[in-house]
Amino acid sequence: MKYTQLGRTGLKVSRLVLGTMNFGPQTDEADSHAIMDAALASGINYFDTANVYGWGENKGRTESIIGSWFAQSGDRRDKVVLATKVYGNMAGDGDAWPNHDKLSAVNIRRAVEASLKRLQTEYIDIYQFHHIDRSTPFEEIWQAVDVLVQQGKILYAGSSNFPGYKIAQANETALRLGTLGLVSEQCLYNLAERRAEMEIIPAAQDYGLGVIPWSPLHGGLLGGVIRKETEGGRRASGRAAEALADPTARAQFQAYEDLLAKHGLEPGEVALAWLLTRPGITGPIVGPRTTEQLESALRAAELELSDELLKSLDEIFPGPGPSPEAFAW
């Protein structure tokens, strides 16, 4: 496994990030533990979760599964760079009260304590804001973060789903207050969805944030979904099925699969490998439901893509280009 610095920090993280969103809803506790064992054995040291994972009545379940895994061995926690998130309402259905969600100092304090308990750990390495909070000023957010850092409960702060201007606003406020600010941004970014190249990734690079793409396979569309349908495998559903219902989009994904078939390459592995070639990218989040899917992601981390292939991929999935040129001269 290769490692890199997380943005401008001294923290070394693996170039693949283990996403845990499936732990609980789709992968039971025993299999989730096996995946984490395999990830750590392969050298993946960056684990990502969120307090709301588990969803619905089971919100928090994913953090609890990770916590039970940590509890089985004393050195696991020391080897893992642990990231979780705050924003969503963690109260049960019908029990929501004011201040039980978003990024007020009150909710940040409450959410950290609850996550620490579920994760069975004394600290969180990277505490991430899952969404922007238009109602809470960054002065308040950084005050809450600084208190938690001083208490040793978190080490760094990161963002997720922030637009470029909010990354700038957050870190300009942090600079004025003399605090570290955001060190990472998780954003939707993959071959088929490249709008992050316009402003989010440039902002992250300018402010020294590591970029962690989520949905690297674009909901399975970049994983060879058309071939799998043809071979009688699981059919696309949800947003993937809606996308393939558009003849133009279907032709685009078909061209992608045909190109990689010509080169004898697996679509999902190429989609991950492509992200690892992109400027400013720390590493994509992979969310395996099985150890076999994790093994595929590990192969992608070692895959070298030729300049010719990269050019062909750009022709199929052209990015929007930087801002403002993407929409102006």
Image: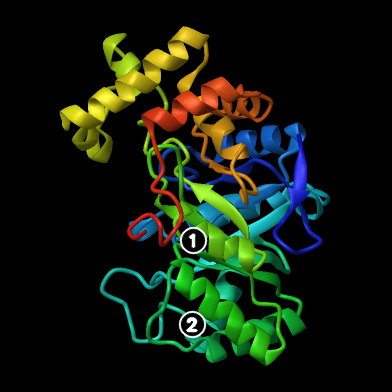
Residue for badge 1 = 200
198 left or right, relative to 265: left
In the image, residue 111 sits, relative to residue 35, either above or below, namely: below
Secondary structure beneath dot 1 equals helix
In the rendered image, residue 20, in percent from the top left (x then y), is placed at 53, 46
| Picture residue at 50% right of the left edge, 18% below the top | 266
Q: Which mark is residue 107?
A: 2
Position of the N terminus by quadrant: top right
Q: Nearer the viewer, mark 1 or mark 2?
A: 1
Q: Amino acid at mark 1?
A: Ile
| Picture residue at 78% right of the left edge, 58% below the top | 11
In the rendered image, residue 52, in percent from the top left (x then y), is placed at 44, 61
Residue 61 visible in the snapshot:
yes
In the rendered picture of this protein, how many numbered marks are placed on residues? 2
In the rendered image, residue 219, in percent from the top left (x then y), is placed at 37, 38
| Picture residue at 30% right of the left edge, 27% below the top | 252
Q: CA distance from mark 1 to mark 2?
A: 26 Å
272 left or right, relative to 232: right
